[in-house]
């Protein structure tokens, strides 16, 4: 795992500029650094190395190809590189290997087969920058699912790229102009979805794509080599026809192979373990293929509602792993908050970033690589919102929309506090009704989606933070995205499957994978995600939905794999999120910090937010009338990020 950066410029530059850009990402690669440049061609590549495979100087980057034509800066891992080497040796008899790094294998593959054919052959996670001396062309490529980040864009006469925005910002001519339209997207999603970034003119390369650019061709030419939408379509067209037992066997074999490949490392390796289905499956299959106890790591909380550590410990004891757990206090969690702007570079408001950083920090004390169970929910219909949305729309769609709008209007005409008072009054008559916590808040949220036009519209409402961001951001207009107008053709999918593929395209790469990458790399830890081996993803889309959702139970086929290794009673429990109690913190320990950032005069002076709706939500949250933690966290994280970048 490493960090890459560089530029293509029409100006004379100094090597120090490249070094400064790379050094800005020191945490991504503390073991080594390197630069390569050609002032006549205007090209510079830089690299920071976290040595994982081939720890010798033979893995140093940037690396030149054997024939001298190509130079590469590479971030990631090619898990099948040994197999590719064998194939290359049969194809290209002139190869003279200098070491055994996957970077050298990748470079030889690009030299032998070209870009598209090489990307199709690779199993792994990666961000690649490749300079072709003959054509004077720069190629950037990103892995299929978006595990590794890659930013790019023109700043004047210079094309910049890098694994993190801090590398681009280290370039002297970088213009840090905030994109208010992207800020609208942030307020809806809690993150900024690709291809946008917080800065004007700077983009994220979409997963499964590669681009080429040159000084003569300023407009990047972008091509897609793998598409989640196409995979879902092909999976439905070539649906798995075997028995349920066949499906379980096939999935277990695929996962075993993916995990075996991802256990490849020349440094200590372990895994995150929450005790849930996904991480427990990964750890179980790791332990089944290891002669030594696998090192596993969990974070515990003293607040029972958020604590999964006891479940993780039980699974670890059963499997016989070398388990480490750390119980953290609210103060320790809150100490992470000042580090968030540096870790994430742009506003990112998924509050589970805090425990993710803490468990990464814990793991890094013992290992350099850690596997995780991320993506199990997106592939095997694990999120409760999938069924909730489908079931809710099934009922709502039977009611004429005008009547739904009328009912919603009646509900919202009564304040949440008044509904809570009514519920308390009726408690003696209707006990179950009166026992719903903060029922007024829940009724208002439900009313907000009652006027939906379709299941897609309903789902957008359920996964959105601020429902109308353009009304909150001054001078901002929300761009169209997959969720808000640029929906791809998903007519081949049912309601639940559409939500799953949308999450695969958006929420997974832009929230989940971003969160883990930045948190782990912030402590120089490489994170790996076995579920995102593209062979597993493609097989999951071949499975009919009944293999994933069965009689209301999520992730059925994955559970069957796990139950071959771990007793069901250790796993079966209500799904928990990986989070922290931001709602109560904002009313307690974080209140002064939040009040300072949400001060009305401050909001007005900065000129990004319309203060009125924010102050109203803050007032309602403090009173306990409503829980606006997610909406307020968006504003707080942006303002903290803004302060950090002004200092």
Image: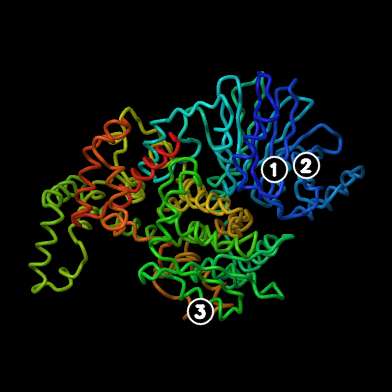
Q: Is residue 120 above or below residue 367?
A: above
Horizontal placement of 396 versus 345: left or right?
left
* SS at circle 1: strand
Q: Write the residue at 18% across / 55% down.
A: 623
Which of the marked residues, 1 or 3, is nearer the chain's N terminus? 1
Residue position for label 3:
314
Mark linked to residue 107: 2
Which of the marked residues, 3 or 2, is nearer the chain's N terminus? 2
Which of the two residues, 341 or 243, is positioned nearer the viewer here?
341
Q: Position of residue 164 (x, y in %)?
A: 56, 40
Q: Nearer the viewer, mark 1 or mark 2?
A: 1
Pointer 2 local density, CA inside 10 Å: few below 14, some 14–19, many at least 20: many
Disc 1 and disc 2: Cα gap in Å? Answer: 9 Å
Which of the marked residues, 1 or 2, is nearer the chain's N terminus? 1
Which of the two residues, 418 or 541, is positioned nearer the viewer here?
418
Mark linked to residue 544: none
* SS at circle 3: helix
User: Dividing the image into 4 quarters, which one contains the C terminus?
Assistant: top left
Q: Is residue 98 above or below residue 532?
A: above
Disc 3 and disc 2: Cα gap in Å? Answer: 44 Å
Disc 1 and disc 3: Cα gap in Å? Answer: 39 Å
Pointer 3 local density, CA inside 10 Å: few below 14, some 14–19, many at least 20: some
Q: Are marks 1 and 2 in contact (CB under 8 Å)?
A: yes
Q: Are marks 1 and 3 in contact (CB under 8 Å)?
A: no
Q: Nearer the viewer, mark 3 or mark 2?
A: 3
Horizontal placement of 105 versus 420: left or right?
right
Q: Is residue 579 above or below residue 637?
A: below
Horizontal placement of 405 versus 604: left or right?
left
Q: Position of residue 561 (x, y in %)?
A: 57, 72
Q: Position of residue 315 (x, y in %)?
A: 53, 77
Residue position for label 1:
74
């Amino acid at each position: 795992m490493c960090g890459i950066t560089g530029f293509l410029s029409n100006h004379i530059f100094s090597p120090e500029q490249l070094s400064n850009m790379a050094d800005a990402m020191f945490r991504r690669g503390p073991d080594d650094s390197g630069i390569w440049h050609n002032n006549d061609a205007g090209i510079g590549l830089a690299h920071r190395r976290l040595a994982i495979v081939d720890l010798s100087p033979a893995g140093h980057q940037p690396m030149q190809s054997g024939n001298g034509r190509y130079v590469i800066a590479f971030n990631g891992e090619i898990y099948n590189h040994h197999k590719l080497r064998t194939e290359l040796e049969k194809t290209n008899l002139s190869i003279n290997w200098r070491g055994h790094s996957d970077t050298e294998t990748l470079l030889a593959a690009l030299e032998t087969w070209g870009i598209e054919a090489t990307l199709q052959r690779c199993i792994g996670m990666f961000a690649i920058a490749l300079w072709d001396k003959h054509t004077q062309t720069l190629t950037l490529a990103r892995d299929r699912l978006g595990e590794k980040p890659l930013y790019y864009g023109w700043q004047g006469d210079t094309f910049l790229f890098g694994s993190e925005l801090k590398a681009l910002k280290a370039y002297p001519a970088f213009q840090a102009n905030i994109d208010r339209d992207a800020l609208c997207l942030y307020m809806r999603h809690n993150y900024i979805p690709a291809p946008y970034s917080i800065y004007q003119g700077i983009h994220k390369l979409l997963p499964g794509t590669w681009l080429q650019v040159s000084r003569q061709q300023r407009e990047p030419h972008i091509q897609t080599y793998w598409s989640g939408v196409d995979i879902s379509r092909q999976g439905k067209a070539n649906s798995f026809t075997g028995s349920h037992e066949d499906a379980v066997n096939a999935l277990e074999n695929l996962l075993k192979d993916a995990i075996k490949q991802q256990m490849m490392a020349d440094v200590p390796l372990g895994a995150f373990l929450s005790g849930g289905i996904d991480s427990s499956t990964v750890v179980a299959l790791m332990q089944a293929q290891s002669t030594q106890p696998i090192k596993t790591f969990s974070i515990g909380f003293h607040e029972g509602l958020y604590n999964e550590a006891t479940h993780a410990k039980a699974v670890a004891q059963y499997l016989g792993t070398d388990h480490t757990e750390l119980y953290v206090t609210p103060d320790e969690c809150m100490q992470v908050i000042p580090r968030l702007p540096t870790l994430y570079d742009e506003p990112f408001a998924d509050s589970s970033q805090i425990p993710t950083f803490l468990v990464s920090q814990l793991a890094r004390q013992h290992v350099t690589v850690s596997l995780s169970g991320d993506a199990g929910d997106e592939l095997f219909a694990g999120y409760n919102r999938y069924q909730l949305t489908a079931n809710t729309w099934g009922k709502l769609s039977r009611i004429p929309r005008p009547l739904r709008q009328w009912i919603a209007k009646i509900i919202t005409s009564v304040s949440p506090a008044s509904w809570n008072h009514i519920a308390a009054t009726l408690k003696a008559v209707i006990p179950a009704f009166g026992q719903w916590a903060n029922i007024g808040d829940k009724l208002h949220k439900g009313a907000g989606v009652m006027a939906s036009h379709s299941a897609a519209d309903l789902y957008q409402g359920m996964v959105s933070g601020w429902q109308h961001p353009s009304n909150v951001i001054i001078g901002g207009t929300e761009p169209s995205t997959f969720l808000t107008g640029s929906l791809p053709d998903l007519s081949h999918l049912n309601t639940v499957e559409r939500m799953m593929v949308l999450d695969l395209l958006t929420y997974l790469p832009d929230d989940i994978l971003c969160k883990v990458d930045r948190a782990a790399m912030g402590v120089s830890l490489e994170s790996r995600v076995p579920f995102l081996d593209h062979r597993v993803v493609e097989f999951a889309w071949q499975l009919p939905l009944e293999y994933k959702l069965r009689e209301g139970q999520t992730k059925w086929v994955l559970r069957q794999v796990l139950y071959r290794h771990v007793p069901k009673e250790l796993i079966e429990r209500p799904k928990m999120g990986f989070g922290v109690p931001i709602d109560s913190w904002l009313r307690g320990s974080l209140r002064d910090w939040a009040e300072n950032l949400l001060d009305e005069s401050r909001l007005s002076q900065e000129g990004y937010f319309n203060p009125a709706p924010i102050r109203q939500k803050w007032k309602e949250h403090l009173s306990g009338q409503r829980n606006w933690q997610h909406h307020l966290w968006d504003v707080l994280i942006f303002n903290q990020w803004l302060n950090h970048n002004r200092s």
